[in-house]
Amino acid sequence: MTQESIIIGGGGEGYAVQQHLLLKYGNRHGLIAGATGTGKTITMQIMAEEFSRAGVPVFLTDIKGDVSGMAAPGTARDSFQRRYDTIGLGQMAPEAMPVTFWDLFGEHGHPVRTTVSEMGPLLLSRILELTEAQEGAVNVAFRIADEQGWPILDLDDLRAMLQFLAENRADVSAAYGNVTTASIGAIQRRLLVLENQGGASFLGEPALDIRDLMTTTPQGQGRVNILHAERLMQTPRLYATFMLWLLSELFEELPEVGDAEKPRLVFFFDEAHLLFDRAPRALIDKVEQVARLIRSKGVGVYFVTQNPDDVPEDVLGQLGNRVQHALRAFTARDQQALRRAAQTYRPNPRFDTEVAIREVGVGEAVTSFLEAKGIPGMVERTLIRPPLSQMGPCDPGVRRQAMASSPVAGKYDRTVDRDSAHEMLARRAEAAAREAEGYYDRDDRRETSWSRDRAARDEAGERYSRARRYQPPGSIASRDDEAPRSRSRSSASASRSRSSRSDSVVEAFTKSFARSIGTRAGSALARGVLGTLFRGR
């Protein structure tokens, strides 16, 4: 029999009425909110467990390191069994979840990477906290890289493009608007800060294949993907932008599925307020748009934060399944926030929602889940069920074993540095320098005749100068380079016709190559959906 719902806890009189979240509405998104220490993390853990056991893969973040215990079975404490009995769940049987550990820095999980091209100029500018003028310069660098066929994969490639802009500032400014040396210098300094924070390890290849987040076990249980985020949280802007990039990748890559029996993936966004802090209105609008549209791809997004006010109203309106832990109202502002939170629920005549949100204890919550036809359920005071897996961090040995037996073990461990903008621009400059300066034959060390000829020297110098300058597409110099670029495009086309997916490092590299490669004829390097959505700004 197909499972239709997951059990979050018990409500009603004596907490004996089981509170269900219907799986077919699991992609209608949700909210887990409450003050510090009220049980949000445990609620996220038990919801992840229940989705996993229903065959739905899960992605969540481990902010404090205390979610990793899902890889180990929990303990059947007497207090937990009593709560099971109260809710009517029978005998508690602790079990470990099938966990895949990830880490942007590759220290406590499999490395997570994407290319600079896939990140796109918009999200990259947000990570670097650039001004509008500096963001414009980044957009120009990406545009020229697209035109010339120079993939921007890592920070070295981006620096090479910025240097190219600086050397050709006059021609570039004439074509695309003013690009100042001050803007380029500021971007270079921000890149240095990002590199010092460890962000460079996130940008490169092989890039993450999002299908690796959507796997199940041979028994049909969804894998729980846990991103270790303790160190990542030291740079909140990088954390928020990474999560936003991942959402955009899911939106762009996944096909439409319509109304499915259950989600294809459930995505928990902990510390969700970081996404919206100091975010421009245009970004918030696009987050709301992605949240609205991504559910048709079968993805459910659950925001985890302290106060519902942390989430903009337009986004909050998209969240149909809600678990509200206690809110503390110590100030007038807190009281207003509490009142607004209570007003978003369908009233229950048995109790006052505002009072309930203030009074629920640890392990309790005010809940509302979508019912038949997507109607919001009546608010209920709910006793949250205990988790089956371990609460708190797991032992290092458990983590190592989980990583060794992971289906992606070894796939992303080694970085790949392929031919890209940095190498292409270096060869371009080196070849031009050799042609301009002349050279000696290695066998007899005699000077070549053309280097003695003044006219030939002048012609070579002009070719060197032309090679160092920016050449718009279709110009004479750019046509001189057409043959080698055509060969490069043929190679790229061949790489796209690769065979079925393999778990090898080579295959992972090939996939990221195919996603990022572009052509001078107008095929832009992949940006992610948010870059596309923002193009009209």
Image: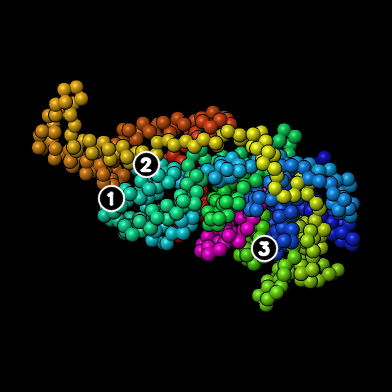
Q: Which residue is drawn at 58% across and 55% down?
A: 233
| Quarter assignment of residue 379 | bottom right
- Of the numbered discs 3 and 2, the one sitting upstream in the chain is 3
Span of residues in magenta: 266-295
Rate crowding at label 3 as few (under 14), some (14 to 19) or many (20 or more) other CA atoms within 10 Å. many
Relative to 93, 494 lies left or right: left
Q: Residue at x 89, y 53 (%)?
A: 82
Relative to 40, 501 lies left or right: left
- 355 or 531, nearer to the observer: 355
Q: Alpha carbon of mark 3 to alpha carbon of mark 1: how far?
A: 49 Å
Q: What residue type is labelled 2?
A: His
- Of the numbered discs 3 and 1, the one sitting upstream in the chain is 1
Q: What residue type is labelled 3?
A: Gln
Disc number placed over residue 306 in the picture, else none: 3
- Of the numbered discs 2 and 1, the one sitting upstream in the chain is 1
x and y percentages locating residue 371 in the rendered image: 78, 56
Residue, disc 1 = 167
Disc number placed over residue 422 in the picture, else none: 2
x and y percentages locating residue 87 in the rendered image: 87, 54
Label 2 secondary element: helix
Q: Residue at x 46, y 59 (%)?
A: 129
Q: Residue furthest front?
A: 396
Q: Is residue 292 in view from this perspective?
A: no
